[in-house]
Image: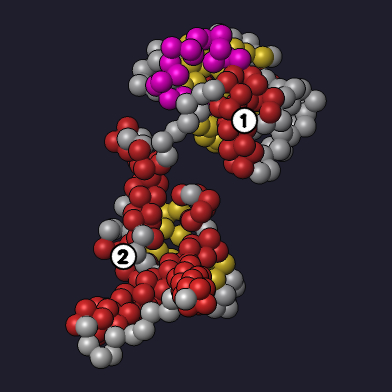
Amino acid sequence: MIGKIRKGRSFSGCIRYVTQKDDAKIIASEGVLLGTVEETARSFRWQCLLNPDVAKPVGHIALSFKPEDAPRLTDAFMASLAEEYLELMGIRNTQFIVVRHHGRDNPHCHIVFNRVDFDGKVISDSNDLRCNERVTKMLKDKYSLTYSEGKQAVKTEKLHASERVKYEIYRVVKEALRSASTWKEFQNKLLKMGVKMEFKYKGNTSEVQGIRFIKDGLSFKGSEIDRNFSWSRLDTALDRNHATFSENIIFRKRLYHEQSHGSVIDNLVEVIGTGGVFMPSVAPTEDEKDAKRLRKKKKRRKGRSL
């Protein structure tokens, strides 16, 4: 289960998009007049009059599930999951529709909701991305839904242009991080794979404040690609790589030296093998000492008896 959150200005455009493709079916709704696209959009707009200062009143969330979960995902269960998701996200006391699509491999639905609630208050979008991650994980655990295999496994050819480029940048950055230990090295590896990197500086200073990745004319902040791709987290990862690579170089040098010149132990083994005069003495064990003392005692008793 994955949630993607967007905001917009036009209810007509969003409702047309979610209801007129992929064998769409409205499986749940609240406080909305269902009819034509325009009739439904008009009922959303009426509520927006309670707070006309909201520039982007359209809330749009796509919930996608893994194909393995398809047999369990009846319309009723998917609608229930969508409504529980809204409740956990704090999106309540407002209009919404849940529209299921059937035209793709993965089961998914779209939620269109009004960011102006029944009381005219704005539904906050503060930390909605982080909250979305926490809520989807909670629901996956609660209902034993299949976890995603990660961004590396996404079929990018099925995505829209901007989403496709995001995933391509993700893969390139992951690949470059495998072997880069400095920012310059990291930047050069990205360029070789078709991705440009730019720093964002604080005012007119040299203090780095953020990072952007550019590919095919599209630009994204590092955190938009993945939360681990912010400037500070990438800086930490490169420092860690540098330390690891340095330790590996020292180890390889020591190993090469020992293989080329032989360690002290190797030299001793070679001398012992020759049976030469430089063979080191081997200290007796405690058991050997006890046995020696016992033999001496027996010898003394035998001498007295004679």
For disc 2, the marked residue is 189
Between 211 and 152, the one lying in front of the other is 152
For disc 1, the marked residue is 138
- In screen coordinates, is 249 left or right of 275? right
Secondary structure type for disc 2? helix
Secondary structure type for disc 1? helix
Percent across and percent down for residue 148 are: 44, 33
Q: Amino acid at mark 2?
A: Lys
- In screen coordinates, is 204 left or right of 237? right
Percent across and percent down for residue 2 are: 50, 31
Between 246 and 10, the one lying in front of the other is 246
Q: What residue is at 67 percent from the left and 31 percent from the top?
A: 89
Q: Residues within 10 Å of mark 1 (few under 14, many from 20)?
A: some
Q: Residues within 10 Å of mark 2 (few under 14, many from 20)?
A: many
Percent across and percent down for residue 295 are: 46, 72
Of the numbered discs 1 and 2, the one sitting upstream in the chain is 1
Which stretch did the figure color magenta? 61-80
> Marks 1 and 2, Cα distance to the nearest angstrom?
37 Å
Q: Quadrant of residue 201?
A: bottom right
Q: Is 216 a magenta residue? A: no
Q: Is residue 14 above or below residue 208?
A: above
Dominant SS type (magenta): helix
The reply to whether callout 1 and callout 2 are in contact (CB within 8 Å) is no
Q: Amino acid at mark 1?
A: Met
Q: Quadrant of residue 207?
A: bottom right
Q: What residue is at 31 percent from the left and 65 percent from the top?
A: 189
Outermost residue toward the bottom? Answer: 277
- In screen coordinates, is 44 left or right of 283? right
Q: Is residue 184 above or below residue 193?
A: below
Percent across and percent down for residue 235 are: 50, 67
